[in-house]
Image: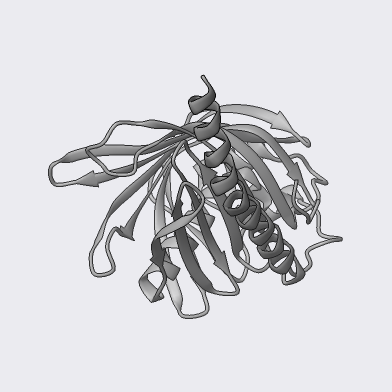
Amino acid sequence: MTLALLIIGLLVLVLLPGKIRLSLRFRKQVADMYINSGNVYDKYFSMDQIYGLPAPVQRYFKYALKTGQPYIETARLKHTGLFKTGLKKKFISITGEQHFTVQNPQFIWKGAASFFTAVDSFIAGSRQLKVALLDLFPVVNGHGSTFNEAELQRWMAESVWFPTNLLPSDMVTWSAIDENTAKLSLCYKAISFHFIVTFSAQGQIIVMETQRFMTDKKRETWICKMSDYKEINNMKIPFTAEAIWKLPTGYYSYAKFTIAKIEYNLPESF
């Protein structure tokens, strides 16, 4: 019993400083990101904005937004869920915290599982992924231009959580495909891409699909599925999201997140 308590005490002494350092670093990164958030205050949604858009896109905005809805400038959320560290590995439980800015495309996400913490960010046009084993030993440090495109695609897909960002703008355009799908295109600085978006008969966005860098040299089909729509702040958003790679060998789901809490225009850490 004494030995067990001693071992537990030593583990706490070893791991606690790393956890504290990681938490403080994350809070500073969040604060730095929000300084560069941009400003969309005093902008409000009007049904006139969706005139001429493809029919399923109009259906979505009529479902998700109400006339007079203020534009979202920042968003922050906490989630629970499941995650795979490799496509053929088993799902593990994960909790996460994520922060977004809208006018300037940015986000930072921290996910914590039993034996590692990951911080994934796209800030000031640059992406960085860091994974620490036991909150102490760095094992991944990814960055580069292909990562930047991939992370901007993540930000775009997760805009379903702040749907005023999906309205037509200098960056965002929609074009028609058929009665239930449309093409969503984004052009930001030197990066451009598009999603094929599928809508339900009710107007919900249920699938978003694009070609995303899976490695630093090759794109693969990346799919996001959204479900469990609920109303919050007079908007309807999905509270469950699943990320899937569609490869020649099949479909590989690797992340299933459920929102536990989401708040808007509060540019600070929880």
Seen at 49% across and 54% down, the residue is 136
Front residue of 15/251: it is 15
Residue 234 point in image, percent of width and height? 77, 35
Q: Is residue 177 left or right of residue 106?
A: left
Front residue of 182/88: it is 88
Seen at 61% across and 46% down, the residue is 16
Residue 206 point in image, percent of width and height? 46, 35
Q: Quadrant of residue 216?
A: bottom left
Front residue of 62/112: it is 112
* Quarter of the image that includes the C terminus: top right
| 252 to 140, vertically: above or below | above
| 175 to 35, vertically: above or below | above
Q: Quadrant of residue 22?
A: bottom right
| Residue at the outermost top position | 1
Residue 212 point in image, percent of width and height? 33, 59
Seen at 36% across and 71% down, the residue is 146
Q: Is residue 240 visible?
A: no
Residue 118 point in image, percent of width and height? 48, 51
Front residue of 129/6: it is 6
Q: Is residue 224 visible?
A: yes
Q: Quadrant of residue 26?
A: bottom right
Q: Is residue 260 left or right of residue 120?
A: right
| 93 to 168, vertically: above or below | above
| Residue at the outermost left position | 249
